[in-house]
Image (cartoon, grey):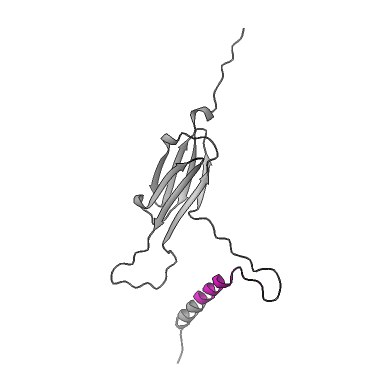
Amino acid sequence: MLTGWTDFDEPFRALDLLQRRLDRVFDGLPDPAGGERLRLRARPAWPATNVLETPEAFVVKAEVPGLAEGDVTVSVEEDALVLRGERKADVPEGYRVHLRERAPVAFTRTLPLPGRIDADAVSATLIHGVLTVTLPKAREALPRQIAVKAV
């Protein structure tokens, strides 16, 4: 009897999951051979964020897939922009989870402001999983044209 390759998918998937979990357990432990410590894997900050600048404002774009308007808050505290939120992983009634790579997560991300801003004019929008925060520069921080007069 011939066995198709697809019959081997499930055991290999289980072995891969086991290997990833074991890797996480042993991250940061000393090397048993007496060498350097095993290197901790750097976890990227979440949410992934870009900070851009225009002549009038700073613009922060953060990827927050699966979050709705009520799941995220934006505030300006001292000299930093603070993003807070929570992604829930609700399982509908009657469903069973087989794989969960998008786990529930609560986050706080503090980004230092690159310059002076007008905190009263900050705006935020959430479109297609991208949070865009516009931080207008303070009036005194904007470049000004100085008129030159001939005498």
Residue bounds of the magenta highlight: 16-31
Identify the residue at horizontal 59%, vertical 15% (top origin). 148
Q: Is residue 57 magenta?
A: no
Identify the residue at horizontal 61%, vertical 9% (top origin). 150
In this picture, residue 50 sits left or right of residue 33: left
Q: Give the answer, above or below, for where 58 lies relative to 71.
A: above
Identify the residue at horizontal 54%, vertical 57% (top origin). 44
- How many numbered marks, from 0 up? 0
- Image quarter where the C terminus lies is top right
Camera-side residue of 82 and 132: 82
Q: Position of residue 61 (x, y in %)?
A: 47, 46
Q: Seen from this angle, which residue lies furthest bottom? A: 1
Question: Main SS type for the magenta part?
Answer: helix
Q: Position of residue 7 (x, y in %)?
A: 45, 83
Q: Give the answer, above or below, for where 118 lies relative to 109.
A: above
Camera-side residue of 119 and 89: 119
Q: Position of residue 18 (x, y in %)?
A: 51, 76
